[in-house]
Image (tube, helix red, strand yellow):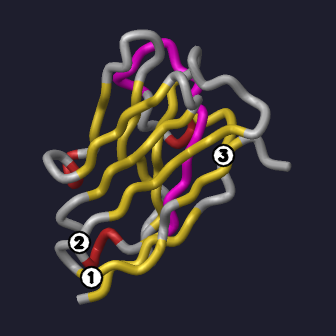
Amino acid sequence: QLPLVESGGGLVQSGGSLKLSCAPSTLSLDWFYIAWFRQVPGKEREGVACVGRIQGSTLYADFVKDRFTISRDTAKNTVYLQMNSLKFEDTGIYYCAVVLVRRGSECLNVASVGTWGQGIQVTVST
């Protein structure tokens, strides 16, 4: 069983919204940076958003700023990615990940990922 499980993906029309969830099966997320990455067709995997540990600071890729919001619910041990104003080019597989970094500025770096979820499909239709 993978330590991270994503849910909430699916098919949505352009301009619509989806909310992804990342819940661990064995980990406590409290002391880790948690990030969402995505792999869209024809491109390398890229960082989307990251949430820090204790104070929950956030970092976003430029292409999702003001559209996506990452958050964590400590009581539920779950991290969310609220995606609004979705575009066709947001279509891809979205992955939740535990990122092993000392500084939040590095948390969207694919090379810093310690644990990946299995990924979930997000499809935005025109």
Residue 42 visible in the current orientation? no
Q: In the image shown, does 35 or 6 lie closer to the viewer?
A: 6
Q: Judge whether 74 appears above or below 20 on screen.
A: above
Q: Disc 2 and disc 1: Cα gap in Å?
A: 5 Å
Packing grade of label 1 (10 A; few <14, some 14-19, many >=20) is: some
Q: Residue at x 40, y 34 (%)?
A: 50
Q: Residue at x 52, y 71 (%)?
A: 121
Name the spot of residue 55 as percent of width and height, x first.
Answer: 37, 11
Residue furthest to the left in view is: 66
The residue that label 1 is drawn on is 13
Circle on res. 116: 3
Which amino acid type is marked by label 1? Gln
For numbered disc 3, what is the local secondary structure? strand
Whether pointer 2 and pointer 1 mark residues with C-beta atoms closer than 8 Å, the reply is yes
Which amino acid type is marked by label 3? Trp
**54 left or right of 77?**
left
